[in-house]
Image (cartoon, grey):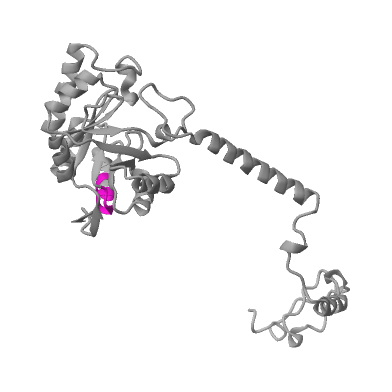
Amino acid sequence: MTPIYTFGGQPARRNLTLLDLRHAKAEGRKLTQANATRDIAEEAAAVAAAGIDILSVTSLRYDEARAAAPDQYIIATIGAPHLVTPDEVLREAFRVATAGADCIYTIRSLKIIEMLAREGLSIQGHAGLVPRKSIATGGLRAMGRTADEALSILHDVRRLEDAGAVAVELECVAKEAAAAITARTPLITHGIGSGQNTDVIFLFTADICGDTPALPRHAKPFGDLKPLRVALDTERRRALSSYAKAVRAHSFPDHATTATMPPEEHAKLAEALDRLRPLHEVPMIDQDRDAASPPPCHPTCQPASPQPPTASTRCTDNP
C-alpha cells in the first residue's frame, strides 16, 4: 500500500497509483479491473478482497464503494444523462475527486476531457464501441476489424492524449487493433472485449460471477451466482407470503414474540378502566341555555335581562 493525499487533502493509502499503472504498462504486467453496479458495498468489498487491481463505479454511488474498499484504486464514472453542462460535469468530478476518487471516466467530448485534465484530474476516455452512441456506429458490434477503422480508433486515442487523458477504455476492438493501439499510445489501455494485449483487462463483476441473464460474447463466467440469486429471491418471496398468511390467520404475533403484563397489573388496569366514564356520558355544561344567548365570559358580566349588554354589564376583558 502506498500512502497518498487525496485531491481533497486527506491522508489515505492506495493499492496502486498512476505511476504504478505506467510501470506495469512498461513492464508488460497485466492488471485486472472489475466494477460494482448492484450491491455496491458488497461488490466493492469483494473486488478488493479478491485482489482485483482496479474498481470502477458510478460517481453517484462512489461513497458507498469507497467506504467498502478504502484502499482500492477506484475509477469514478461520470454518466452522460444526468450531467449535461460542463459546469455540472466539473462539479461532479471535483466532488468525487475530493472524496478520494483516483480517476474520472467519461464518454463526453474532448472539450470536457480537456477541461477536467486542466484541473489536474486523472481522466479516462473511451474509444472503440461506445454502446450509448451505437446508433451512429452501426449498432452493437466489434470495432476495428478493418484497417481503416483500426486507424480511426488510433486517431481517436491520440486525440484523447492531446486532450490530457491518462487512460482510455477500448471496448470490443479487434484484438490486433487493440494490440497495435496499446503499443503506440502512452495512455493506459483498459480493454473489455478487446483481447489480451491491453494494459488492463476489464470485465463486469456480474459477468465474472455468472449473474447476467444473457452474457455478451466477450464475457466469460467464472462463477454461478445467478441460481443463488434466483434461490434467494424465491426464498424472500416465500417468507413474505408466509408472514402475510400468519397475520391474516391470527397466528402472528404469537406468545413467543409478544410482551405481556403481569396478571396483577392487568387486573389493576381492568379495574381502573371500569371506573372511567365514557366521553359521551360526561354531562354537557348548561345544555338548556337559550341557544340565542351567548354564554357569559365571566359570572359578574351576566346581564339581568336578555337585553343587549350596556357599558355597565359588558365584560371589561372583552371590549
- Residue 164 in view: no
Indicate the quadrant where residue 36 lies. top left
Indicate the quadrant where residue 165 lies. top left
Task: Say which residue appears at 20% left-offset and 58% top-offset.
Answer: 9
On whether residue 34 falls in the magenta region, the answer is no
Report the quarter where the N terminus lies.
bottom left
Q: How many marks?
A: 0
On whether residue 95 falls in the magenta region, the answer is yes
* Residue farthest bottom in this picture: 300
- Residue 304 image point, x, y percent: 82, 84
Question: Image height check: is 52 above or below 266?
Answer: above
- In the figure, is residue 147 to the left or right of 309? left
- Residue 185 image point, x, y percent: 12, 29
- Residue 303 image point, x, y percent: 78, 83
- In the figure, is residue 46 to the left or right of 93? right
Task: Say which residue appears at 19% left-offset and 17% top-offset.
Answer: 150
- Residue 116 image point, x, y percent: 19, 41
Q: Nearer the viewer, residue 154 or 276?
A: 154
Question: Image height check: is 165 above or below 253?
Answer: above
Report the quarter where the C terminus lies.
bottom right
Task: Say which residue appears at 32% left-offset and 54% top-offset.
Answer: 70
- Residue 99 in view: yes
- In the figure, is residue 280 to the left or right of 162? right
Task: Say which residue appears at 75% left-offset and 88% top-offset.
Answer: 300
Segment tinted magenta in the rendering: 93-101
Question: Image height check: is 216 above or below 186?
Answer: above
Please name the predominant secondary structure of the magenta segment in the image: helix
